[in-house]
Amino acid sequence: MYQYYKIAGLTVKMDTFGRTAELALPYRIDPCPEADITIDPGYHILKAFAPDADDEMCEYMASGRVFYRNLLRFDGLMLHASAIAVDGKAYLFSADSGVGKSTHVVLWQQLFGEERVRIINDDKPALRLEDGVWYAYGTPWSGKHGINRNLRCPLAGICFLERGEINKIQPYAGSDIVFRLLKQTYRSKNTQLKEKTLSHIGSLLEKVPMWRLECNMEPEAAMLSYNAMTGRDQHA
């Protein structure tokens, strides 16, 4: 049975079940005449390749894939990152799996409190360009722990994490940042969608500060990134 949801500012018509339906509840709205995105049940497609896989997880992955592919048509894209809201602004931490982006976010919460530091999406936030400003949104597709909130905040910075013994942060410079962003987003084989992805990345680089953080898992790393990304170190 189709239900309607408002996700990343878009009306989504979706027939789903299980984990996806549960995590989508905070985004539920009354039925609408038209939908921006329609998501049909798609778990059977993944089941064809992995017949022993769990139906709910297959549906969760398939529905998310459809949403993020369509998001490209609405001046948006997904970034594999942990997104937090602090003082009305969004900050994203992206890294390869296992580096510790979620752990870094927990350090922010320990330093400043969970009331002040709220997780928007712990794995795949939606980013959209609206009236010349990039915003980060929560979505139901938020990794194995399902941590997300139905929030929208202007995007104030993206930080790429790397493991290091000494904490060090600097603005991200160099052309390799394009490939790093591409690695952490949805990559379609469709030529038109490929062009949209590159265009969106170009806009992100133009409008959103990018940082590179070498860090350990000590509170000092979170304070360092907080001061740099919020501009506090410029006024010290």
Image: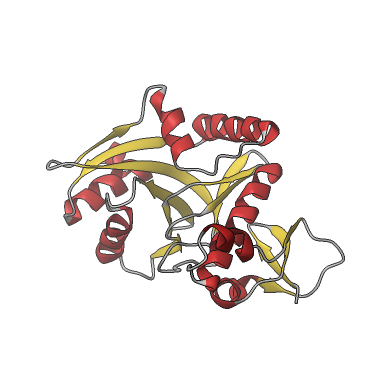
- Quick one: 127 or 209, which is closer to the camera? 127
Most distant residue in the left direction: 165
| Residue 86 can be seen, yes or no | no
Q: Quadrant of residue 74?
A: top right
Which residue is painted at 62% across and 61% down in the image? Answer: 63
Q: Could you tell me residue 5's position as x and y percent?
A: 69, 68
Q: Could you tell me residue 14's position as x and y percent?
A: 71, 67
Residue 220 shown left or right of residue 138 in the figure? left
Residue 96 shown left or right of residue 52 in the figure? left
Q: Quadrant of the C terminus?
A: top left
136 w.r.t. 134: above or below? below
| Residue 234 can be seen, yes or no | yes
Which residue is painted at 32% across and 53% down in the image? Answer: 101
Q: Quadrant of the N terminus?
A: bottom right
Which residue is painted at 63% across and 47% down in the image? Answer: 69
Q: Could you tell me residue 219's position as x and y percent?
A: 19, 56
